[in-house]
Image: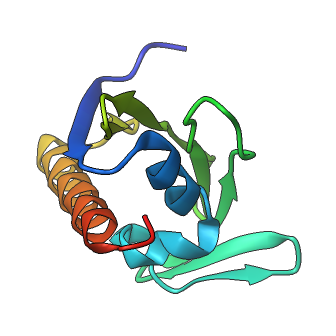
Amino acid sequence: MSMSEALQLSVSIARSAERAYAFLAEPSNFPEWATGLGALRKVGAQWVAATPDGPLHVRFSERNLFGVLDHWVSPLSGADIYIPLRVIANGAGCELIFTLFRQPGMRDEKFEADAAWVERDLLNAKKLLEARSDA
């Protein structure tokens, strides 16, 4: 298996890592900021996101003390896509860091569009968390 091209995308958030993680680790909160997982709902023991390309099954990492928010999406058309996501402390605030892997056969335009989409979602998370009085 060869390595995939990877891009690190991040945003600084003026909220503690603990508060940001508490909100971001809850799968039901993802649709508030992660537009790729809009209309996310729990079906039995699984999370399912409705997308223009059909339903995606989504598996989230267990809550942990390390700021890991990794998740995996499973499109009907292929294998699981691993999405590494981390919250790390930065003084009184935190960094939200997303690793975007280029998928096999992905054209440059699609990879760039995905990166722009992730950047928008990270900014959504930042705005949402910084506006919340309980975050």
Q: Quadrant of residue 103 in the image?
A: top left
Q: Where is residue 109 in the image (x, y as percent from the top left)?
A: 11, 49
Q: What color scheme is it?
A: rainbow
Work out which residue is located at the far right of the displayed protein and give it: 44
Q: Is residue 51 visible?
A: yes
Observer-nearest residue: 34 or 91?
A: 91
Q: How many labels does the image show?
A: 0
Q: Is residue 56 visible?
A: no
Q: Is residue 90 left or right of residue 123?
A: right
Q: In this view, does 109 lie to the left or right of 36?
A: left
Q: Quadrant of residue 43 in the image?
A: bottom right
Work out which residue is located at the far top of the displayed protein and give it: 2
Q: Where is residue 56 in the image (x, y as percent from the top left)?
A: 59, 69
Q: Is residue 67 above or below residue 63?
A: above
> Residue shown at 51%/86% (left/top)?
39
Query: What is the quadrant of the N terminus in the image?
Result: top right
Observer-nearest residue: 74 or 118?
A: 118
Q: In this view, does 3 lie above or below 132?
A: above
> Residue shown at 36%/70% (left/top)?
33
> Residue shown at 57%/56% (left/top)?
22
Observer-nearest residue: 36 or 53?
A: 36
Q: In this view, does 14 lie to the left or right of 129?
A: left
Q: Where is residue 70 in the image (x, y as percent from the top left)?
A: 57, 42
Query: What is the quadrant of the C terminus in the image?
Result: bottom left
> Residue shown at 45%/71% (left/top)?
134
